[in-house]
Amino acid sequence: MIVDIGCGNPTFLKVFQKKVSCQTMGIDFSGKGWKNQDYNFKNVNLQIAEIKDLSSNLHLDVITMWHHYSCFKSSITFLKN
């Protein structure tokens, strides 16, 4: 699974999912990036959340911050734990 932290408009995840055929998850502090476009991203798991809200039981293969780094400080803390 690939997760994109701060995904904004999750086009990156959609393209990645199509090319690599993998599970994708995008999290962002708001759903503005995909608002009124849910139909475009129906196979992408999109969540309004922060990195600290992710389950520690998730098995992630790749973590990206493709769209922006606004949650960088909390992301580093989470990854260290």
Image (spheres, grey):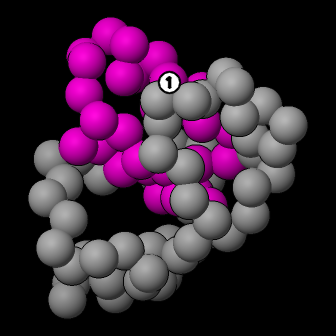
Picture coordinates of residue 16, whole percent (x, y): 38, 22
3 above or below 17? below
Amino acid of disc 1: Lys
Picture coordinates of residue 59, whole percent (x, y): 14, 59
Work out whether residue 41 or residue 26 is closer to the camera in this orientation and state it.
41
Q: Is residue 15 magenta?
A: yes
Q: Quadrant of the rendered structure where residue 40 is?
A: top right
- Tell me if 72 is positioned left or right of 25 in this view: right
For label 1, count other residues whose C-alpha is less than 10 Å away and answer few (under 14), some (14-19) or many (20+). many
Work out whether residue 29 or residue 68 is closer to the camera in this orientation and state it.
29
Instruction: Mark yes or no: residue 12 visible.
Output: no
Work out whether residue 42 or residue 33 is closer to the camera in this orientation and state it.
42
**In this picture, which residue range is highlighted in magenta?**
1-28
Q: In this figure, what is the number of numbered marks?
A: 1
Q: Which residue is mark 1?
A: 14
1 above or below 47? above
